């Protein structure tokens, strides 16, 4: 008599544990992260405070100074502070993707890659790369030719900005690639050309 309730309880516990594990394993298939920009301002002092001394010299107080960041980029792109250097439309490679890739030279910020109206399928450890390939083929396990990693993808959809190293020779790079780092698979790519 006592064994049946214990067996039922054990089976129920295993079913709950199994369903939680199953949800964890399949959730990347239907949970999507969306990156939306929100306005922020960064502040930093204009003068570093000096240690206290016994002199009667006047002291300076810290005043906030706005620091340019990628979060402020949408406002900079509307004015004369940004110059469009190259752009291209995303096409699907191994997975569905779409949107526009644009490279800007932005005053006080430098080179910036902007993804607009962007959308890509979910995958593990997606990164944004620049590569020298004109056409990115659907390969698996092969490194990108001279790929430059600009960082982890900020979201599966929405407008996003990525800093490009200032010393990079952009004339050598032909495509922007959404790259699955662990499996070396190109999800989507955009050929970039001067407008």
Image (spheres, rainbow, N blue to C red):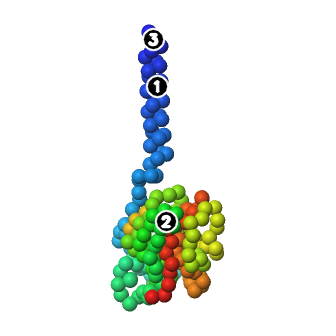
Label 2 SS: loop
Question: Mark 3: which secondary structure?
Answer: loop
Closer to the camera, 70 or 3?
3
Q: Quadrant of residue 165?
A: bottom right
Q: Is residue 73 above or below residue 97?
A: below
Question: Residue 114, position in %: x, y?
Answer: 44, 76
Q: Which mark is residue 2?
A: 3
**Badge 1 element:** helix
Q: Is residue 154 visible?
A: no
> Residue at coordinates 52% horizontally, 63% vertically from top-left?
94
Q: Which residue is mark 1?
A: 11
Provide residue 16's location: percent of width, then percent of height: 44, 33
Image location (x, y in percent) of residue 52: 52, 74
Q: Sort mark 2 into few (<14), some (14-19) or many (20+) by Cα contacts within 10 Å.
A: some
> Residue 153 — which label?
2
Q: At 51% across and 78% down in the image, what residue appears?
A: 191
Q: Residue at x 56, y 72 (%)?
A: 136
Label 3 close to label 2 by CB (< 8 Å)? no
Is residue 146 visible in the rendered image? The answer is: yes
């Amino acid at each position: 008599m006592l064994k049946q309730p214990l067996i039922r309880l054990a089976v129920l516990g295993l079913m709950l544990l199994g369903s939680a594990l199953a949800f964890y394993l399949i959730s990347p298939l239907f949970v999507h992260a969306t990156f939306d920009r929100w306005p922020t301002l960064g502040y930093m002092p204009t003068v570093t405070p000096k240690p206290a001394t016994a002199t009667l010299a006047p002291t300076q107080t810290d005043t906030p100074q706005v620091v340019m960041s990628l979060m402020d980029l949408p406002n900079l792109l509307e004015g004369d502070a940004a110059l469009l250097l190259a752009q291209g439309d995303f096409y699907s490679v191994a997975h569905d993707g779409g949107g526009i890739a644009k490279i800007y030279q932005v005053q006080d910020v430098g080179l910036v890659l902007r993804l607009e109206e962007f959308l890509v399928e979910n995958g593990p450890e997606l990164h944004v790369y620049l590569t020298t390939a004109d056409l990115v083929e659907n390969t698996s396990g092969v490194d990108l030719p001279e790929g430059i990693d600009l960082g982890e993808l900020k979201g599966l959809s929405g407008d996003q900005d990525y800093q490009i190293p200032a010393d990079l020779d952009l004339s050598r790079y032909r495509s922007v690639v959404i790259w699955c780092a662990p499996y070396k698979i190109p999800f989507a790519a955009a050929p970039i050309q001067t407008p």
